[in-house]
Image (spheres, rainbow, N blue to C red):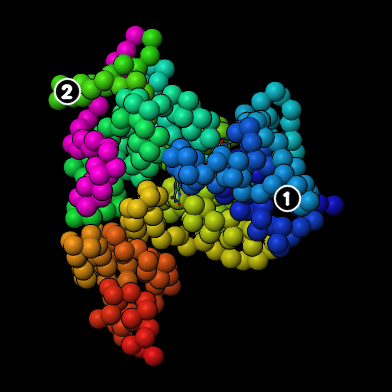
Amino acid sequence: MSEPLVIIGNGMAAARLCEELAQRSLGRYAIAVIGREPELAYNRILLSSVLSGEVPARDTYLKPANWWRDRGVTLCYGAPVTAVDIAARQVTLAGGSKLEFAKLVFATGSRAIRLPVPGAELPGVLTFRDLADVASISRAAHRGTRVVVIGGGLLGIEAAYGLAKAGARVTLVHLMDRLMERQLDARAASMLKRAVEAKGIEVLLDTETARFAGDSRVEAVEFKDGRRIAAEMVVVAVGIKPNAEIAAACGVAVNRGIMVDDRLAASKSDVFAIGECAEHRGVCYGLVEPANEQAHVLAERLAGRDLRYGGSVNATNLKVSGVHVFSAGDFLGAAGTESIVFADAGLRTYKKLVVAGGRLVGAVLYGDTIDAPWYLELMRSGAQIDSFRHDLVFGRALAERRAA
Ligand SMILES: Cc1cc2nc3c(=O)[nH]c(=O)nc-3n(C[C@H](O)[C@H](O)[C@H](O)COP(=O)(O)OP(=O)(O)OC[C@H]3O[C@@H](n4cnc5c(N)ncnc54)[C@H](O)[C@@H]3O)c2cc1C
């Protein structure tokens, strides 16, 4: 008899877990995936490209419907789980139907944070997290529409770019003194600002939103310094919050996310969490690669092997056409690290590599990002770089040619 395994959430982590389980232990589990969104799991990373019109929405699906069917996975989508009863080993779906489980995986991801300011609920104030958001933004954005994007992180910049490409007049507003401050140092961030402005996007730094103004829908954004700009639409991209409320309500330990150990196990037996809803060693990751690594470890464990998850290296690529930006690991360089810096203003190229104890521990690349996968590999493996350190900043091809 197959054990009933219920996965809550039909996002990227759930899809990867099913794929990994299908390769290892098909038949051992009767898998049911319950998703709130009314569609097959899709590649959320591509939402920016859908918004900019570079990829049609239908091309984002991770697997066709028959892939799930052929592997015996029961898919319920458009059906949020509303409650979990751990003692009775049952989940309840909206509408009241119930499903038994022997093992339960939370893969509920995150949601976009709404700004806690007056007017945040006005029509025309939107977030950027799922296909429904992209449809709402696209419906409201026309050539010449006045749009304010709040948040100068990766998502805000990608939203601003997508909207500008669609012909909207976009102002990007950021609270901090530089764009993508969690991924870039000051120099890379100022190069990025110039590139964003060259796309026709106005950038306001050090600017704090006070309220959204309007009667029946948003008409303007007002800032703490008294400035006000007209807006027919606002896209808020100021961060994410793990979807952990249902786990907390059924007694599973939750801090910011659902707390898991190196086995990806939550505080109740046979309950696990992966992806953005999970908090491992105090970290909630907001990226796909950690979710994939967690899915891999959990699939191995569910197949009976004793693999452990030790954490992931954070790495980010900005997806704005013609603007190549990569950041990973300790890009600022903590005490005790050394930085190797290469800059060529004429080529609009900047590279900063952070080294500690003979290993690469962080990188920021602007312009030339061709060696990003190599640097990431060096960081993940913890390989010693002393023997080719003098060539490191010039990339893999040179370092390997000289070593040969
Ligand atoms: C515009 C955009 C661009 C991005 N770009 C990048 C990038 O370049 N690189 C990168 O690494 N990451 C990127 N990300 C982040 C990446 O998409 C996420 O890290 C990844 O999707 C996390 O996977 P997940 O399965 O944990 O969460 P999700 O993919 O969000 O899936 C969770 C699913 O669970 C569902 N759910 C929640 N609660 C319930 C419930 N109670 N019942 C049923 N279903 C529920 C949600 O509706 C959702 O469908 C981007 C995100 C966005 C929004």
User: Of residues 94 and 55, which is closer to you in this image?
Assistant: 55
Q: Helix, strand, or loop for circle 2?
A: loop
Q: Which amino acid type is shown beneath numbered disc 1?
A: Trp
Q: Which residues are magenta?
A: 189-215
Farthest bottom residue? 404
Magenta-drawn stretch contains 238: no
Q: Which residue is mark 1?
A: 67
Q: Do we see residue 241 in this rendering?
A: no
Q: Is residue 64 left or right of residue 343?
A: right
Q: Image point 31% across, 83% down: which residue?
A: 388
Q: Helix, strand, or loop for circle 1?
A: helix
C-beta proximity under 8 Å, tags 1 and 2:
no
Pointer 1 local density, CA inside 10 Å: few below 14, some 14–19, many at least 20: few
Disc on res. 357 = none
Q: Which amino acid type is shown beneath numbered disc 2?
A: Arg
Residue 289: horizontal and vertical position, in percent? 49, 56
Q: Is residue 154 left or right of residue 28?
A: left
Measure the alpha-carbon separation of dots 1 and 2: 53 Å
Residue 391: horizontal and vertical position, in percent? 28, 80
Residue 370: horizontal and vertical position, in percent? 37, 66
Q: Image point 34% across, 9% down: which residue?
A: 215
Q: Is residue 14 left or right of residue 282?
A: right
Q: Do we see residue 50 in this rendering?
A: yes
